[in-house]
Amino acid sequence: MFNLHKGPKFIHLDLTAACNLKCIHCRATSKPDPNELKIDEIIKFLDFCKKEFPNWEAILIGGGEPLIREKDLFNVMDHIHSLGIKCYLNTNGTLINNRNIAKIKKFVEITQISLDGATPETHDYIRGKKGAFNKAIEGIDLLLRNKARVYVRMTLSMINYLEAFDLIDLALKKGVEAVSYYRTLPVGRAKKYNIYIDKRIYHLILKELMRQKYILKGKLDIVSSDPLKVVMDGRLKMEILKKYDISESIGGCLPGITEIFINNIGNVYPCTMMPILLGNIRKNNLKEIWNNSQFLLKIRDRKNLKGSCEKCFLQRVCGGCRAAAFGEYGDYFAEDPYCPNSFMKKTHRYKISKHKKSKFITFPCQSCY
């Protein structure tokens, strides 16, 4: 049984807010911050986590663009490697080159590169720089030639949803390990541009992606950290119902349950998409935040959910995206507006067996896969 008091399994760390691109949906400012965590502060924090959190398995380093701080990045990764913790890297891929590829291969479990279009026109428009697509492809090719594990990730919006399945074709052609999808959420610059994907369109796309996952099994992994995949993927739903007692298990949206986010200046948030400040690692003890934060204690209890999520039999293995709920209703505990049970107002009832094994069902968050 997963023990919450042993800390998070996944830590998300933004090394910098600076970036060489300016994506229209991004939460980062794309500008350097003079108050960013120094290398010695990060090392001290990593040592603290290793000592205090027996659950800790992996860290995801993102930004901004983490390769902007290349020297610090590899010093941090070297230390993570020495601690025996898995390291994942989120990057736009444009700064991967022959000089740094060997260290990426050595230290990184999976490199995830964002491709927000299957064509240069779409990707470059979203990323705010001409040539970004070709540079990202060069980075992917270099990683693959060096036998590194590569995921590509698309953030779905009204701009690029028509290329969602073209990205699968591109991924198959390139030979990457997986394609990951999520929806645009109302954080950062996304709030300025009204590009959120239509709810019904997203429902149809996610459902078809989950179908393609089984068709392409063994050739390409199709993954999504969206908790709604449990609702959309009938086979996954049945597997969970057979294997677990879902009145005791928990999965889906997992901020403050298996994961936590530290930004580039040390601020602590439940996840990368939930702008509720819990403290700062320069001033506060992360273990105390993890164990005692009133917000985390409340969000861990799915009985606090409202609307369709309150009534849903999949509440504990899905829970809806709390960031999406806040973006739509200004309430972290409201129903997920993208769930078909919300926007179609359908109710599903099933009998749940009482004798099945109880366990936490952990799906790493959007940044990990």
Image (tube, rainbow, N blue to C red):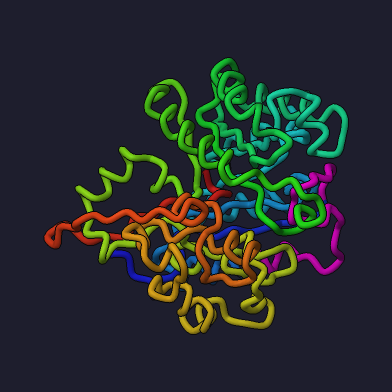
User: Which residue is nearer to you in this view: 327 or 79?
Assistant: 327
Residue furthest to the left: 355
Q: Give x and y (percent) for residue 143.
A: 63, 27
Q: Residue at x 46, y 61 (%)?
A: 254
Which image quadrant for residue 140?
top right
Q: Is residue 168 above or below residue 29?
A: above
Q: Give x and y (percent) for residue 74.
A: 68, 47
- Asked whether, in this view, residue 103 is left or right of residue 34, the answer is left
Q: Give x and y (percent) for residue 1.
A: 27, 64
Q: Residue at x 69, y 47 (%)?
A: 196
Q: Residue at x 31, y 38 (%)?
A: 235
- Answer yes or no: is residue 364 visible: no
User: Which residue is nearer to you in this view: 118 or 193?
Assistant: 193
Q: Residue at x 44, y 45 (%)?
A: 229
Q: Count all numbered tags in the image, as a single digit.
A: 0
Q: Is residue 368 above or below residue 292?
A: above
Give the residues in magenta.
19-44
- Answer yes or no: is residue 341 visible: yes
Residue furthest to the top: 173
Q: Give x and y (percent) for residue 257.
A: 44, 67
User: Which residue is nearer to you in this view: 220 or 214?
Assistant: 214
User: Which residue is nearer to you in this view: 206 or 171?
Assistant: 206
Which image quadrant for residue 239?
top left
- Asked whether, in this view, residue 301 is left or right of residue 202, the answer is left
Q: Main secondary structure of the magenta part?
A: loop
Does the magenta segment cover residue 117? no
Residue furthest to the front: 345
